Amino acid sequence: MHSTVEDVKLEGMEIKILPALQDNYMYLIVDTKTREAAVVDPVEPELVIKTLQEQQLTLSKVLTTHHHWDHAGGNEKLVKLWEKELDVYGGDDRIGALNKKVQQDDTFTIGALNVKCLSTPCHTTGHICYHVTAQEGSGKGAVFTGDTLFQGGCGRFFEGTPEEMYEALCTKLSSLPDTTKVFCGHEYTLQNMSFARHVEPDNEVIQQRIEWAKHRRASQDPTVPSTIGEEKSWNPFMRVHEASVQKHAGGATDPIVTMGKLRKEKDTFKA
């Protein structure tokens, strides 16, 4: 495995970080009250089932961020292997085993946890981020961002526009509480932060995070999660309003123009 398996304890929930493939992350979301669990993007179902059995958890839901095979490719196998019926959520008909199609502001529960769906089309037209909070908590919670928001970066615009990624990052995800933990789809932090440093060489927060991430990766520890507030401090794609980022991208003061130019540059950037 590319990283160690880690547990993150949050208000009313436990997130189990499960590495998959070359650099993907799957996540088990566990309601601490009921021990009911949901899994995000279970591309390696055997590891998911092994973890569920070891922890004596009840799996009821699959949360799919988007249809790409490295995220949705395990859905059908998991549904076959798991003895109970599963609700498979997603925002795109191209997702395998989908039986609960969702859109912006749809809600459901995992035990005593609330889940709200955020539609973030751009990387794919049907991409969904899932915001999970404790029903009786302060609303901080966690957001599972797939390939829309990465630590220090964002997904390629395969099926969308700079306007859509701006809406996703700078309107929808930015409006979550700054303390919200961000669990993204890949271990891309060092590559992304290298580009962030290229965009803002004088941003000390970026350099500090690079040093921290190097230590984590040296012992194969995951660099997720970050927080929404942290992403606003170092992620160039969430900083398209900042003069320093606009200057790097050619000086246009339109944040959407800046978003497009940054993504085009990042597509060919060599760390």
Image: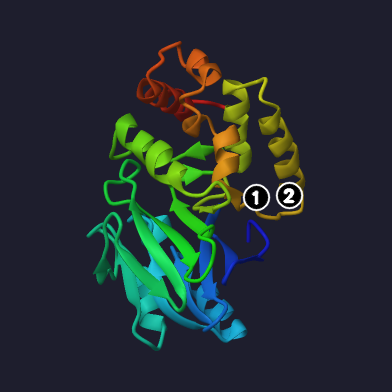
Between the residue at mark 2 and the residue at mark 1, the CA separation in whole angstroms equals: 6 Å
Instruction: Name which residue type carries label 1.
Output: Thr
Q: Quadrant of the N terminus?
A: bottom right
The outermost residue toward the top is 251
Indicate left or right for 189 with 71 as reference.
right
Q: Nearer the viewer, residue 238 or 94?
A: 238
Indicate left or right for 78 with 211 as reference.
left
Q: At x 51% / y 44%, what residue is drawn?
A: 150
Q: At x 41% / y 21%, what residue is drawn?
A: 258
Circles 2 and 1: CB distance less than 8 Å? yes
Pinpoint residue 211: horizontal percent, then vertical percent: 75, 37
Is residue 220 visible to the viewer in this orientation of the structure? yes
Pinpoint residue 161: horizontal percent, then vertical percent: 30, 32
Instruction: Name which residue type carries label 2.
Output: Arg
Q: Which residue is mark 1?
A: 223
Q: Which residue is mark 2?
A: 216
Q: Nearer the viewer, residue 246 or 194?
A: 246
Q: How many marks?
A: 2
